[in-house]
Image: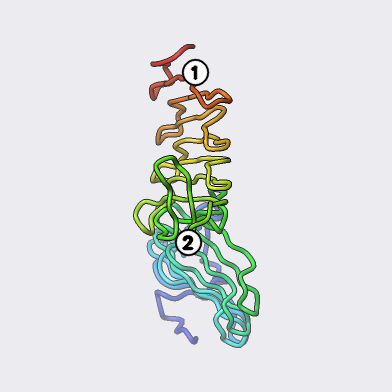
């Protein structure tokens, strides 16, 4: 790409007037927050094209290999990556897809080898420690009766069941089943992803200590179950940490 030296909105990264703050990523040109495009590299070699608005990274960013083939592409908004970012091998095959949320940052990342096989996945299930083969509670092949006994395709279930907000929303709970009965960790999250409760089942019964948290991460409840499944003790706290129910 040939750029006129008189184009005020297109500058070279090596221009001595360019200054980038390492902590914030903001760019100024000759002491002024820059709006426009920055070219990195030289003709005949790997190149990158960056977009800025009032000093912030904002707009389409892209990079190419020496032959002009795409290397990466994605959007910034208000200095933060947003939406889908993609990377490619020199062959043109997709190498990586990262998805960013405006509020929560990196939501998911999938890496492929040059044959197109998935070699790495990082997403909500990974963050929450949920098995990738977990079954959605809305799966029509899943049934859980009034006693909490689960079957999948007519057979007792061994595996994890997740519940989401809506059909595609965040996971808000996961329970583990063995031979159709709840057995193993049980966890729940608020809609924003913060922990709501953690506990354990054994052969269909709640056991050990169960903890509950509010949306700010403050412990608000503790229930201790006896080996037989009954409640041995129960305590509750308000948002300031003051005990409001149960023994000290």
Q: Against 42, is 197 above or below? A: above
Q: In the depicted view, which residue is nearer to us: 185 or 122?
A: 185
Q: Nearer the viewer, residue 246 or 41?
A: 246
Q: Give the residue displayed 43% in from the left and 62% down from the top.
A: 82
- State which quadrant residue 93 falls in: bottom right
Task: Place residue 138 in its image quadrant.
Answer: bottom left
Q: What crowding class fits label 1: few (fewer than 14 Cα within 10 Å), some (14-19), or many (20 or more)?
A: few
Q: Which residue is mark 1?
A: 233
Secondary element under disc 2, as helix, strand or loop, is strand
Query: Which residue is pictured at 58% across the width and 25% down the height?
Result: 227
Residue bearing the label numbered 2: 27
Q: Secondary structure at mark 1?
A: strand
Residue drawn at (55%, 25%), measured in percent from left and top? Answer: 228
Up/down of 189 relative to 50, above or below: above
Q: Quadrant of residue 37?
A: bottom left
The numbered disc on residue 26 is none
Percent of width and height locating residue 156: 53, 51
| Residue at (58% x, 85% y) in the render | 43
Most extreme residue toward the left is: 166
**23 versus 96 height, above or below:** above
| 78 horizontally vs 248: left or right | left
């Amino acid at each position: 790409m040939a750029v006129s030296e008189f184009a005020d909105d297109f500058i070279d990264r090596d221009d001595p007037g360019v200054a980038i703050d390492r902590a914030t990523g903001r760019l100024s040109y000759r002491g002024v927050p820059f709006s426009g495009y920055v070219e990195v590299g030289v003709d005949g070699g790997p190149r990158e094209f960056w977009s800025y608005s009032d000093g912030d990274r904002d707009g389409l960013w892209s990079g190419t290999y020496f032959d002009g083939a795409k290397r990466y592409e994605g959007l910034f908004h208000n200095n933060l990556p947003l939406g889908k970012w993609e990377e490619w091998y020199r062959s043109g095959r997709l190498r990586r897809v990262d998805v960013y949320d405006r509020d929560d940052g990196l939501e998911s990342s999938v890496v492929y080898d040059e044959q197109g096989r998935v070699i790495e996945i990082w997403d909500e299930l990974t963050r929450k420690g949920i098995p990738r083969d977990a079954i959605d509670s809305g799966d029509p092949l899943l049934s859980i009766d009034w006693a909490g006994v689960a079957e999948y395709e007519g057979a007792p279930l061994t595996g994890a069941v997740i519940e989401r907000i809506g059909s595609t929303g965040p996971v808000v709970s996961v329970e583990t089943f063995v031979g159709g009965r709840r057995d193993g960790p049980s966890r729940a999250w608020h809609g924003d992803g913060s922990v709501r409760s953690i506990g354990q089942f054994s052969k269909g019964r709640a056991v050990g200590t169960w903890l509950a948290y509010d949306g700010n991460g403050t412990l608000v409840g503790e229930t201790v179950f006896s080996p037989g499944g009954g409640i041995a003790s129960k305590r509750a706290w308000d948002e300031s940490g003051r005990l409001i129910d149960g023994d000290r």
